[in-house]
Amino acid sequence: MKGFLLNDLFSIRRLLKSIAIVYLVFMVAWSAVGKPQMPALMLGIMSISYMGNLFSYDEFYHWEKYQRVIPLSVRQVVLARYLSFGIAALVTLVLGLMYLLVMRVPLYEIGVILMGTAAMQMYTISVTVPIYYKLGVAKSRLIQLLVMLIPAGIFMGMITVLRKEFSEFTVGVELILGGVFLVLLIGILLSVRISIRIVRKKEV
Amino acid sequence: MVLQVKEIHKQYPQFLLDKISFELPEGAIMGLIGENGAGKSTTMRIILGMAQADSGSVSIFGHEGVTEQDRAQIGVVFDELPFNQTLFVSHLGKVMQGIYPNWDQQAYEEYLVRFRLPDKKELKDFSRGMKMKLSLAVAMSHHARLLILDEPTSGLDPVVRAEILDLFLEFISDGKRSILVSSHMTGDLERIADYITLIHQGRVMLSKNKDELIYGYGIARADRQTLAAVDSSLVEAIQDGPYGSQALINDRVRFEREYPDILLDRLNLDEMMVMLCRNEVHRQ
């Protein structure tokens, strides 16, 4: 698995530089207009686009063929890919947290923003990864866009409601959030199972 | 046997791989030859578990199927470089170190020096020959017992091809390691292969020891009537040409003894493949 994670990291090392520049520009722009929560959300979205790029590299450079002849099971190969996305999501959340702390955003709001972002990432990964494995990059891009519009709307709404209706994490809010994340976690586990099944059946 | 392929059958909507069988012993090189689309790559994909056969079996290292432990002992080279080409060779070494349990970084670095593969260029800037050498370096740096190579010498200049063929001979020199290689370069296979398997339209047309083919087979040239009178058990194929006919003979010694008046020439794998494949087309 370590080799796979390294391969993913080396593959996107160039892309990371350009993403960092674009991100810095947006960060300054959003901060200037008084919406410091937006860059944190954008980081989350960027981590999702990372997913498409990796699948695209795999296809373009025939790495998906090579994955089938190495001494790793399909399960390990698929898990490594989810782990790679998980790490990317975590890194963006940590960066988002650092940025929000620097911008002196209230702690409650930081929590809401980061949880909204994490929920969006989990939903998108669980829905789109099996689609990438099944349909390939070209067909999946459009579907990913459609799939992302739904959670983006839902989680933006969630953030808005939480910010307007509450000012701290009450027991009720925590229960709701716990339920949401439990469902999302189950979604990820189901997604991994489905992806493994798709890859096992897929001929390359 | 390192590799045993038994009656592999695979039906695609427009292609049938029909009961493919052959065996590769230890310390030997087998060349898979055939036209484009004959089924060579599909056979290799089934052997490697990249596609599933409808029936039949593949045994590697003495047992049926290919396990993850087996894959650690198989080196694979595709006709295209299967690695992200924005990487450097040092990146690739680190990636493979994390994938193959018996990865030998020192061997890899020695191959890089031997093949003059620089670490200052991204893989996309390598020539086709360099990319192929890199694929081979990776395939041979984890102590593989079996190499499976799909068209490794196509598109390469004669110097690089010769270098690669020498490497194959070196690889099997300990008598324990084997190579299955598909190629259109029948001249290359004549030089290095111990066994030849010809696949045509999804079927094995012959699978034999190379010397048996090169020294045992011959091409008889005469008019059609004369060749038609030859014992049919000696004739694999007959073809008519503008200056007479020619027949592919499967037993030179017997033919020369029984038909001393008919001209019999040696032939190479290329001519043999063309005659067998064309004959098959005519039969249909």
Image: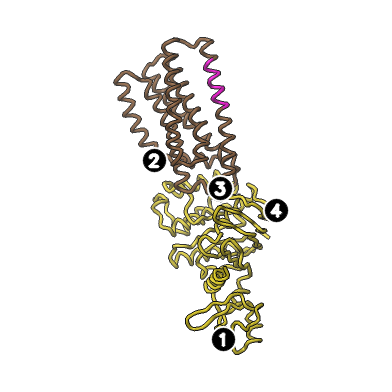
Chain colours: A brown, B yellow
Q: What x and y, as percent, mark residue A28?
A: 31, 25
Above or below — where is B258 with respect to B15? below
Q: In the rendered structure, are the residues bearing label 4 and label 1 in contact, judged by CB atoms less than 8 Å apart?
A: no
Along the line of sight, which residue is nearer the eye, A21 or B245?
A: B245
Q: CA distance from mark 2 to mark 4?
A: 44 Å
The segment highlighted magenta reads: A176-186
| Residue B216 appears anywhere in the view | no
| Residue B93, percent from left and from top | 50, 48
Q: Earlier in the sequence, mark 2 or mark 3?
A: 2
Can you identify the residue that label 4 sits on? Answer: B63
Chain letter belonging to callout 1: B
Q: Amino acid at mark 3?
A: Glu
Residue holding disc 2: A14
Q: Which residue is rendered at x = 32% and y = 23% of the image?
A: A30
The kind of residue tagged 2 is Arg
Q: Give the x, y percent position of residue A159.
A: 43, 17
Residue that badge 3 annotates: A203
Question: Same chain for marks 4 and 1?
Answer: yes
Residue A93, image quadrant: top left
N-terminal label among 4 and 1: 4
Q: Could you classify mark 3 by the number of other residues whose Cα lies within 10 Å: few (under 14), some (14-19), or many (20 or more)?
A: some
* Image quadrant where residue A152 sits: top left
Nearest to the observer: residue B270 or residue B241: B241
Residue A178 magenta? yes
Residue toward you, A92 or B208:
B208
Q: SS of the residue at dot 4?
A: strand
Question: As shown in the figure, which amino acid type bears the numbered disc 4?
Answer: His
Q: CA distance from mark 3 to mark 4?
A: 23 Å
